[in-house]
Image (tube, coloured by chain):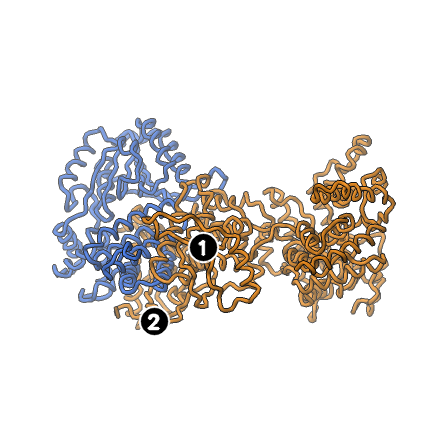
Chain colours: A orange, B blue
Amino acid sequence: MPHKLSQSSTSSTKTGKTASQKRTTLRLEPSTANTKRINPMTAFVNASAPRTTSSSSSKSKGKGKEVVKALSPVVMNQEINQQESYQLWADLYEPKSEAELAVHVRKVDDVRNWLREAFEGGPSGKLRKYRRLLVLTGPTGTAKSSTIRVLSNEMGFEILDWKSPAGDAFANAELDSISSDSWVSDETTFTKFRLFLERASRCQNVFKTTSTPSSSSSPSSSSSKNPNLAPQRRIILLEDLPNILHASIRSQFHDVIRSLVENADPDPVPIIIIISDSGMRGEAGDERLASGAWGRELDGAVDIRNVLPKDVLHGPYAREIKFNPIAPTLLKKALQALLKRHFASSSRKSPITGQMLDTVVNSANGDIRSAIMALQFACIRHGSGRKSKGADSSQVLVESITRREQSLALFHLMGKVLYNKRKGDPPPPSASAKDIARDQELDKTLRDPPALPPYLSEHDRKASRVDVNTIYADSPIDSSLFSLYLHHNYTQFCGDVDECDGVAEWLSWADSSGGEAWYQINPYQFHLLALGTLHSLPTPVPRLSQRVCKPVFFENLSKEKKGWEGVRDVRSWIIDQNSSGSDDGGWNISTWTPTAIATELGGVFRARDVAINQSLGLSTSRRMPSISSIPSTHQTFSHLKFVYPKSDNRRSLGGQALDEEDADALSSDGAMIEEQQEMGMWQDGISNNGGIGDPERRVNVADAGGWLESDDIESF
Amino acid sequence: MSLWVDQYRPRSLEELHYHHELSNRLRSLASSGDFPHMLFYGPSGAGKKTRITCTLKKLFGPGVEKLKIDQRIFLSPSKRKLEVNIVQSNFHIEITPSEAGNYDRVVIQELLKEIAQTQQVDLNAKQRFKVVIINEADSLSRDAQAALRRTMEKYMSNMRIILCANSTSRLIAPIKSRCLLMRVAAPNAEDMQTVMQHVSKRVGFDLPPDVALKIIEDSGGNLRKAILCLEALKMQSPDLSGALTIAKPDWETYCHKVADLIISEQSPARVMEVRQKFYELLSHCIPPATILKTVADRVVERVDDAIKADVMHWAAIYEVRMRIGNKKIYHLEAWVVKVMSLYKHFFYGMDLTEFD
């Protein structure tokens, strides 16, 4: 270890020396005024340089000389190649061809095919009508926009990009006040947006009628046609959406999109919307859900379900392509290529070691933009930080640069909690030597809790290797979803019922702690659940190849919803009966509340079905409507077959298993959260929001159990 | 087509078959001209609603049977539209607050205000007031109950409220104190026998007393359930010889089997299976409290006396939690696990403390 350290320290000082000759640091100076526009990002680069030196110098306290030395070159080296530093690498080295894109080839193909169909109509030529709206979704920094730009180069179409005018308006505020009759200021932002869309979808660009495919490789088809006659291909790119969180603007936006998408333009301009997923997590949503009162109106996240109206989203005109976080291998390759390009121009050596690169790649979570930013920042810092002490400190440096909220994959989160590792646990057979070493390292830092008095000895546990605060900070899901995951999976990890009892008790307690209203909800739910589970589970948890599954809670919830729809159908049928035939008093409507229908009428309805089937010679499919006009949806709640569990040792858990590559756990959770919200909405209006399902649908619920076998009710 | 329960329901206080004392009291109250707010409570299927309608008829005459159903739209504070079906006659109006979900306060307030502020215009009406019947009053939210309490005093001059609830324990004290409490107890076996014989006579068939007894035993004092069961049984086996299970709602049988599952094995895997069953029940719109009660009843039947009390004790605790909490399945399951643990320890004849 020590010799390794010294070795790398010399190498780093060497790089430090070389870097000091061509320093890339900058100082705030009047020259910034020369730049046309102050970009907040580059401004930050400017300002950060002196600050970084001071911060790094403060690290080496007590070495006053060093500080002076460290500062002096900054003052001296003022003439630097500013151009390079002003631009962010992410902009500077934006990919120009598909080869440079770090996106999976198939994803690019998807987008390209869509665009081709949008321009040419696919093989049949008819698809064009339906390729109106493409939505690219995915986490930030997954090259969504870059893919479009690259394809624009390659296929030769023009991008009409909407830029929100808000910034300009402020920038021109002084101008406007002078020339007060400026008509621009009269329009609201949204009007501008709508005008932009209308003009962009109808009008040709006056200045660029000669359609010259800008890329070197001419696009496949347009060369055959006469490029001068064919109209310039265009797409409308919406990245900077109007404020759709505002309800009225959202509905206006929806109207505009709908009308654009649905009008029968023979020569439509495809629209591409880029939506970056923002992580949906927060106790606030949880609380709102609990209140059940505030639905989606207050929902603060921009995602595809908000941006597009439902009918368009599920309609034939729209298509969504999801971008995944960039794979580490692709990301690393791209970063290496970038570094090579950057340092090829200037004869300097790259200060980024392979290890640093790995750290950057790992911490980026597939966000290439942040990775590039971190690299650039690392290079700047590395240049100024002279006294960095070898690989160790450069590692620290990179880590401090790349520090961002690291999200813990859902799979790992559940594993951490459910495997309940404690100090001194024997390592699992599959563990590598590295893992074991790490665990031992960790164990050294753990202090044993003080011994409990004898009467509490049943609660004695070793120190846990799981730090609940950390997993709470990194958890990708909120406490409600966390509890659902725990609930669905804990039984596999328990050896016997007593351990189950502990976990179940905690789940129940945490769910009911606090009060009935959302603002009374327990803010410590997550901690309580995690700690409670850790306390109750056996240590060590026996490894029986458990599989963590997604909770089936929401599926059942939607089934329940369907059931209530059935109840509603029956109820409105009863009401109809009453208003039509008033011979013998008919039904006593007020007695048949929804709950009464669900719990008490089931037997009669089923009996009636059976009786009618018997009279019809057991033909289930045809029933005479004159005899029974009970809506068949009653089966959603009245028919319930009991299925005995198979005495199989491999018992079905139900639910989809999670795995390590569950990268889009968050997005699927987004769907869950939406369902959750729907649940909230639905709870407050069980009977009033319509949406009565297909009355013909006969849900044979028993089938849904998964293990349908011999189902003789009387056999027990 | 209507059910026997509705078709042969007594329509006047004189026709009622049991609780004659109560009927007499109601009769004299209705004719006294000083009619209070009332709260009818008792187990389901005991005849609360029947008595309320009979009293109304006594109060207002046959006009009260001319019902119409209105669909009213209310606006929630967040501008959501709520559609609520309201049954009303010229003299009274009925609301089931559970239809309005979380917004029952809004609905109740709006309705009551509207009724209270309109005078009875029919000069021939026997009473100057209108009656508001609130079904399932114990499912009213706290807010709604608080709102009700003020209205009850304020609009006494032209409105009376009749609440109908299973138990008074979920009503706030101020409401209870403003009402005349009327307890409608479940009928005993003889009463039920008479009623069922009466129904079968009206329908036109002969009901063997032993079949009736079997149904009565099974229904646990719930007359409505008994008559529904009788009708379903008659429908499927006209000679009434079939097993009762074919006439009962599926979920009851289902709950009993879940209880059997709990008792037959106590293991984490079994917990998983029972959970699956609970999910099924819940998705068939069976209220979680009902599930818990039915399963617990059955479990108590089958376990040893020593742990019967504990089983019910925990059922009560988890029922309360269920009411406060959000995800019902947790509490159902927590109870199951608790029972399994209790049963197991009892079965092996050892206590938790012996593990130490």
Count all numbered tags in the image, as a single digit. Answer: 2
Mark 1 lies on a secondary structure that is helix
Q: Amino acid at mark 2?
A: Ser
**Apparent side of residue A248 relative to residue A389 in the rendered image (left or right):** left
Provide the residue designation for mark 2: A647
| Quarter of image, res A74 | top right
**Apparent side of residue A284 relative to residue A141 in the rendered image (left or right):** left
Q: Amino acid at mark 1?
A: Leu
**Apparent side of residue A450 relative to residue A57 in the rendered image (left or right):** left
Q: Position of residue A451 (x, y in %)?
A: 40, 49
| Quarter of image, res B303 | bottom left
Q: Position of residue A51 (x, y in %)?
A: 74, 41
Q: Position of residue B343 (x, y in %)?
A: 26, 58
**Apparent side of residue A445 relative to residue A96 in the rendered image (left or right):** left
Q: Is residue B91 visible?
A: yes
The residue lying toward the viewer, choosing from B8 and B332, is: B332
Which residue is farthest right?
A79
Mark 2 lies on a secondary structure that is loop
Residue at the spot 75% in from the left edge and 49% down from the top edge: A387
Provide the residue designation for mark 1: A484
Q: Chain of mark 1?
A: A
Q: Is residue A603 visible?
A: no
Give the spatial CA distance, label 1 vs label 2. Answer: 26 Å
Above or below, A324 against B73 in this view is: below
